[in-house]
Amino acid sequence: MDWIKGTKGNFIKNGGILLLSVVISLFLVEALLRFFPFDFPHLPVKRLKTDSDWPVQRPLKILVIGDSQCVTDFSFPHLLAAKLPRNVEVIKMCESGCGPDTYLQFYSMAVRRYNPDVVIMSFNVGNDIINLLDFTEAPLKEKLKLYLGSNFETYHLARIAYSRIRYGIERKILQAKLGKEEKPQAGYSEDEYVSGVNVFALQEAKRYPAIYKENLAVSSEDIKKAYDVFDSIMHSFMNKLNRNKTPLILISIPDALQVNIKYHEFFRNIGFITDSDMLTSNAPQQRLYDLSIKYNFDFIDALPDFRKRDREVLYYLNDGHLNRKGHLYLADLLLERLHQKGYVDGP
């Protein structure tokens, strides 16, 4: 019995030491990530101009936050940075697969690191609200993740490491299961096709074929609840922005299915439900406009401009992402608004 008690006591003692070591290690890592004066690879940050390019005075800092629509080197943050004066810095914090909850987390980190003067939120009409559906299914879990992501950079270090491992494995499993390989499309320009079909889109088409139809019509109860979640996120977002006296420009990227019928074929072929009503719907944009009035932020609706250019190829024909030409139009729209608001000098 004494041996059992001794073993139990040692187990508790060693467990306590291990727990304390973990807490201290997390504290030290958090301090390092917060205060070490470099951008760490765990954050999806890209500073698009270097300090040596600027005059002595502090440059105007524009923060761009968004999802996979913004991650490529030809996306609108890069094109916008090339058009701006040299005393303006564009800081891009964009990550594939994220949504408005992550945008709020990114802004919380950006305030600590960069103290931006203007914030541009890229809202992807195609899936940003869809990414909030988890809040309707597991609200406590998602709220905890939102809190951790807004306050601790170690959370993002663990989150991104986990997601890269998980999705790397899942991609290989899905490719084998669905019999799809990501091969280049022969005979087309780089602005018409990307290298292959996203296997996660194929999986989503099998699981929820009406998701894009419901999203663009704002017709299902789940989508409506997700907009309520977005309203709550914007409330928190605007409180943070107003405390820092930082203006927000929200630019909505239309879904390809809203712009031209030629984009429907790909989505139908992989299993999604599409119809002609999508080409006239502006229900998501109206929701965003209503929120811009409610919370007093600047809203750019790119849908009318994109529909006028419907004969041009603005999205990839086997994907929902903008190509270089589509991003160029967004950069021009943003540059015009930045000039109108007086944030940067006019041409």
Image (spheres, rainbow, N blue to C red):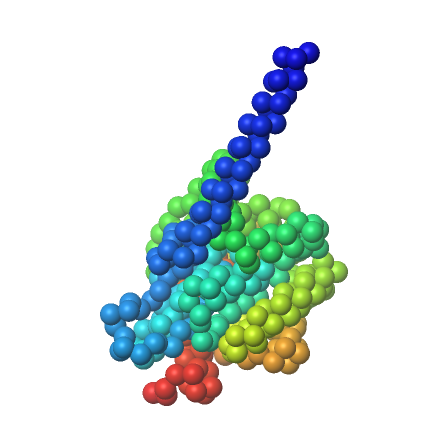
The N terminus lies in quadrant: top right
Can you name the residue that lies furthest to the front here?
A: 2
Q: Residue at 62% of width from left, 17% of height from top?
A: 6
Q: Residue at 44% of width from left, 56% of height from top?
A: 34
Q: Is residue 332 above or below residue 7?
A: below
Q: Is residue 149 above or below residue 310?
A: above
Q: Residue at 55% of width from left, 36% of height from top?
A: 19
Count of numbered marks: 0
Query: Measured from the top left, where is residue 254 in percent x and y?
Result: 54, 69
Is 221 positioned to the left or the right of 196 in the image? right
| Closer to us: 259 or 223 | 223
Q: Is residue 222 above or below residue 296?
A: above
Query: Measured from the top left, where is residue 187 in percent x and y?
Result: 34, 55
Query: Measured from the top left, where is residue 192 in percent x and y?
Result: 40, 61
The C terminus lies in quadrant: bottom left
| Closer to us: 68 or 23 | 23
| Closer to us: 198 or 137 | 137
Is 73 positioned to the left or the right of 6 in the image? left
Task: Say if residue 239 shows up in the picture.
Answer: yes
Task: Say if residue 185 shows up in the picture.
Answer: no
Q: Residue at 40% of width from left, 57% of height from top?
A: 35
Query: Measured from the top left, where is residue 251 in percent x and y?
Result: 52, 73
| Closer to us: 118 or 65 | 118
Is 75 positioned to the left or the right of 125 in the image? left
Q: Is residue 162 above or below residue 311?
A: above
Can you name the residue that lies furthest to the left here?
A: 52
